[in-house]
Every structure is written in structure tokens, then in C-alpha cells.
Image: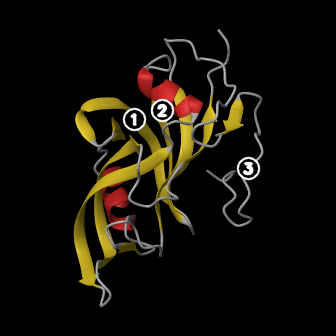
Amino acid sequence: MSNLDRGTGQRPQPSHPQAHAIGRPGRGSGLAPAPADTALRFAGYAALFDRRDAGRDIIRRGAFTKSLAQRRAQAAGPLPLYWQHRPEVRIGWVDEAHEDAHGLAVTARIDNAAGGAAAALKSGRVTGLSFGYRARRFAPVPSGGRELNEIDILEVSLVTHPMQHAARVERIHLPAPG
């Protein structure tokens, strides 16, 4: 995730011929379809720190630290990647999730690169990221909502409308032509 450049506010330049910055929703990205037998990988932010979401909650730096460390210590395996938070529609797995200065950075893969979820992502129709969680430590905010200080993360989802509007897929990586 080091090639996500939030500090400059500019999209990173592809570092590999098969890595592409994602286009704006509603515009074709010009990306070729991936072979059906390989996964489509992507990177982005499932959560952003210190920004109020549509539910008026604010996630603070360090909120995911304990949960991610426990998952690693227990060898819990990867987080599932769902379509629109629907557990019956698991579309892939989160290969890496970690906190950085901006939020919860994730790299994930969609198992069926020729399926509907991958097509929606490649075309830019669906680029939102979100996550399912259990709040462990939080405090009410006087203006409404909560300040989330400790979160158990349960899943990451590719969604049409994320609670944090700027939580998005930043890059996709197409499988090498076979």
C-alpha cells in the first residue's frame, strides 16, 4: 500500500504495466477483462481516520490495531470480502489490512475476475469500500454520533455507497494476460 499517495492528494502512477488507477464512477476505465481463472486484485481504504461518516461516527487512529493484531496472533486467516455487506455473497478475501496515517489500508482480491463484482469495479460503477465491525471502545460526541477508539473488524465489503464517501478503491491490478 505504500504506492497510495494520500499525502499529495493525487492518484499514484501505476508501477506495473498491469496496475491501473481506477476511473471515476460512470466512466469506462478501458481495462481489459481478466481471465476467469485468476483473481482481480485491488487496493484502497476501507476506513479513513478523523472524518465523520454518514452515521456521524468518527474513527480514530489506532482503532483497528488490537483487532488486527489479535487476528494475526490467532492465525485467523484473511478477512472475507463481501458484496454490499452480504455474508452470503463472499466475492473474495482481504490479503492485507493495516493502519497507516490516513486510515485502514487494504489490499484484496475478487476471486472471479470475470464475474459481476469485478466488472462493476473495473468499469468504475462500484468503487466504495466499507467494513463490518463491533465497536469495543467508543465515546459519544456532543454534536451526535460516536468517536470510535477500538473496533473489532469482521469483514470488508465492496459497496456502492460507503458510509465514508472517500473510502474507495484506489488501484486495481489486472492479472497478466494468459
Residue type at numbered disc 2: Arg
Q: Residue at x 24, y 67 (%)?
A: 135
Decide which of tag 1 and tag 3 comes sooner along the chain.
3
Decide which of tag 3 and tag 2 comes sooner along the chain.
3
Q: Residue 165: x, y in percent?
A: 48, 59
Residue 93: image tag: 1
Q: Residue 74: x, y in percent?
A: 28, 50
Residue type at numbered disc 3: Pro
Residue indicated by mark 3: 12
Task: Say what secondary structure mark 3 lies in.
Answer: loop
Residue 109: image tag: 2
Q: Circle 3: is it few (<14), some (14-19), or many (20+) Cα within 10 Å? A: some
Q: Residue 57: x, y in percent?
A: 34, 73
Q: Residue at x 39, y 72 (%)?
A: 59
Residue type at numbered disc 1: Trp
Determine whether label 2 and label 1 are within 8 Å by CB: yes
